Amino acid sequence: MRNERILVTRSSLPPFEEYVEEIRSVFESHWLTNMGEKHRILEGELKRFLNAEHLCLFQNGHLALEMSLQAMGIQGEVITTPFTFASTTWAILRAGCKPVFCDIDPVNYTLDPEQVEARITERTTAILPVHVYGHLCNVEALKEIADRRHLKLIYDAAHAFGVRYRGKSAACFGDLSMYSFHATKVFHTIEGGAVTFRDPELEDRLFRIKNFGIQENVTYGVGGNAKMNEFEAAMGICNLRHLEEEIRRREQRYLRYMKWLRGIEGITVSEIPEETESNYAYFPVLFDAERFGESRDAVCERLNRNEIYPRKYFWPCTNAFDFQKEFRDPESGAPQFCPEETPIAARVSSQVLTLPIYASLPLEAVDKICTCILEGRRASG
Ligand SMILES: Cc1ncc(COP(=O)(O)O)c(C=O)c1O
């Protein structure tokens, strides 16, 4: 193995000729965006692949979520997890709602249903959990709460493309699920995203909101611009053909990591739960400084010195950014963001490193990364 920098991820690409062939008709038609042929084909293929009743493509996952909250008329308080990428929380805030943070399950790091109920008030309108790292939430318990309390259940499924539970894709759970097709994801369209949903009435509303409020030359209301273009849709059509191989190769890397790291004192790795097909999108590892003998930050620094760049993903939690410290709730005057309310999320966030994983990562690179991690333990022990 050459001594190259190993980054946390590397975007997959289809063969160059395959993509060029796919965009030939775009060059011929000069139809570059505005829901063209590639957009239509990709929507159909994704709908089938995800077993979605309805699906709408977007320019990215963030706008897909933000605009979906608006299109669904979500207002007031939204119960959510702080252990996620900032986008989830910002979508709630930018849609004019208040995020109410609830702690996570210590094993799979998703929203803990047992703690959701206590956060529901008369202002709560929705629950917005995240299938973080592609770990599916406790979908059954969350559905039971949402149904009983008449709340919308909206999933951030940005990490969960291709994940299945009891044979059902993540798109089959909740009222709506948002997928990100960002270049770093298991399946990507360079930039892109989609939502899958149940309510047929949302179809037109979502179309309009991503297209300036316009449909068939009639302006129905106020909207933004979040259309996926034809070059991105063409990339998605190509990448979908290679998805199976992409996931298979990621699984090999996952298994290699597990061989090295499973059962090591002070290290927690994520097992694939029963009846779940994973997409192996991420490889999160928690370091317990006392039991492992070294903190997450010390491990990360040594990896960086060896040209290996994992990510502290997600650190800090989305209720713990420095700039939020002064924010006060307009009504009560209490701190608006309070990381102490979600201690498990805070702990996981302080211990986690997501290690490099992608289809073209050489298996020897996994060996090198793990050797480097475990060297620290021996040195300190
Ligand atoms: C959990 C989560 N939600 C939302 C997003 C936003 O998706 P996008 O980058 O496609 O806007 C991401 C991003 O990558 C994410 O990781």
Image (cartoon, helix red, strand yellow):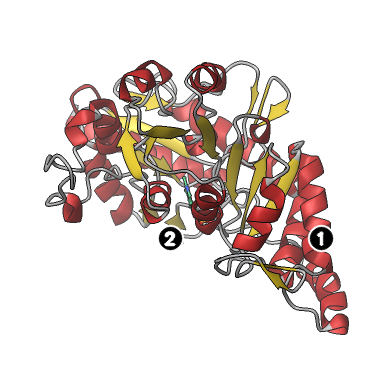
Write the residue at 49% across / 37% down.
Answer: 133
As drawn, the label of residue 5 is: 2
Q: Is residue 25 left or right of residue 89?
A: right
Mark 1 burial class by Cα count in 10 Å: few <14, some 14-19, many 20+: some
In depth, the one of 178 and 9 nearer the eye is 178
Mark nearest the camera among 1 and 2 is 1
In depth, the one of 62 and 204 nearer the eye is 204
Mark 2 burial class by Cα count in 10 Å: few <14, some 14-19, many 20+: few
User: Given the image, on which type of amino acid does mark 1 rest?
Assistant: Arg
Q: Secondary structure at mark 2?
A: loop
Give x and y (percent) for residue 100. Answer: 31, 36
Distance, label 1 to label 2, CA atoms, is 39 Å
Quick check: 30 above or below 314? below
Write the residue at 18% across / 56% down.
Answer: 323
Give x and y (percent) for residue 279. Answer: 62, 37
Q: Is residue 12 left or right of residue 371?
A: right
Q: Which residue is mark 1?
A: 40
Q: Is residue 302 left or right of residue 186?
A: left
Q: Is residue 189 left or right of residue 159?
A: right
In depth, the one of 2 and 105 nearer the eye is 105
Write the residue at 50% across / 21% down.
Answer: 142
Give x and y (percent) for residue 187. Answer: 65, 51
Q: Secondary structure at mark 1?
A: helix
Q: Residue 178: which quarter of the image?
A: top right
